[in-house]
Amino acid sequence: MTDSTRKTSLTGIKPTGDPHLGNLIGAIRPGLRLAESYDALYFIADYHALTTIRDAAEIRNYTRSVASAWIAAGLDPERITIYRQSDVPETFELAWVLSCVTAKGLMNRAHAYKAARDRNLEAGDADLDAGVNMGLFNYPVLMAADILIMDTDVVPVGRDQAQHVEYAADIAGSFNHAFGETVRVPSSVIPSEETGRTLPGIDGRKMSKSYGNTIPLLAPEKQLKKLVRRIATDSTAVEEPKDPDSSAVFQLLEQFASPEVTADARKRLEAGGTGWGDLKNELFEVLNPQLEPIRERYAELMAPGSDLDEILAAGAVQARARAHTVLTRVREATGIG
């Protein structure tokens, strides 16, 4: 499964909620495409989820759910490596080593930490660090360890997450400066607008769990139809011309329908005579057949006795073999062990 002639890509998936259509278009599909040209690894970042989740059953369920969803959406365990972060303890030893060469000032400038302090400032809280745990503060170091422990060349991220890879590169550089060229310095791959597009939610804003406006990837057929019908539209009459590009319904259709169907819908909207209700029906008829096999495979993987645990266990063996190689170099460079 490991191809030494190709560069390595690493995709991290945080198990903090059920995946939605925005995740499919913006993260899952672009991530899966990397397997076509890279030795691709995917990990479920269950320890990262501890910064916000305090329920053990929830962590277990989300970890299995996100792994099942990615596999159901097309991730092929025969071609790639998928594993749980928690199954690679070498990551956490490396995280401590990296923390010893990471400047606190760098962590002070991390987006997540600064955003937490800004929220406290806006709320008038005198303690700007209120509610900030060390997991949140040290998050970039653990993420750097996730990346460096796999000898990663590239990491696919959205533009708002690029800082994490930049930090990993900075930390790798600091380690190599202190101990000699030991760890690989990674770079980011940011999906193009076409392949990593942000989808609108049912209220027209960016589809996001924080807004509660998502269309779940695994929604049953009846729920899917109801959610599509709820997508916000304007009051333009059926017979009047409409602007497709300002319509959340059309933007969703554009991502899932064929170019021919999309072009026909655009033409009819611009000419007038097609109502938003008609377009929503078309969107549902396009979405449901594509999502049905994903739902079915997901249900199989989540069922007791499925092959999911075997897939993750096999991935852990492969991942630990890579991690052992890197950690051995790090120990030799630092004089530990």
Image (cartoon, grey):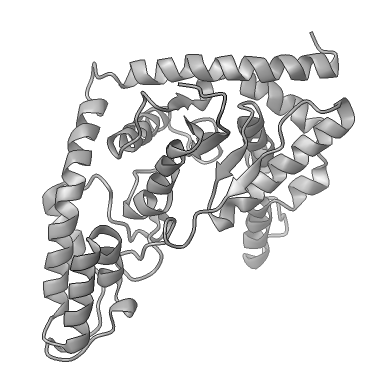
The reply, left or right, for residue 109 in relation to residue 155 is: right
The reply, left or right, for residue 318 in relation to residue 93 is: left
Residue 135 point in image, percent of width and height: 63, 37
The reply, left or right, for residue 250 in relation to residue 154 is: left
Residue drawn at point x = 50 percent, y = 17 percent: 318
Farthest residue toward the top? 337
Quarter of the picture holding the N terminus: top left
Farthest residue toward the right? 178
Residue drawn at point x = 43 percent, y = 48 percent: 30
Residue 33 point in image, percent of width and height: 42, 43
Residue drawn at point x = 35 percent, y = 37 percent: 70
Farthest residue toward the bottom? 240
- Quarter assignment of residue 203: bottom left
Q: Is residue 155 above or below residue 231?
A: above
Residue closest to the eye, 153 or 282:
153
- Quarter assignment of residue 207: bottom left
Residue drawn at point x = 50 percent, y = 22 percent: 2
The reply, left or right, for residue 253 in relation to residue 189 is: left
Q: Is residue 136 above or below residue 99?
A: below
Q: How many marks do you count on the picture?
A: 0
Q: Is residue 233 visible?
A: yes
Q: Is residue 236 visible?
A: no
Quarter of the picture holding the C terminus: top right
Residue 100 point in image, percent of width and height: 81, 30
Residue 306 point in image, percent of width and height: 24, 19
Q: Is residue 254 above or below residue 113?
A: below
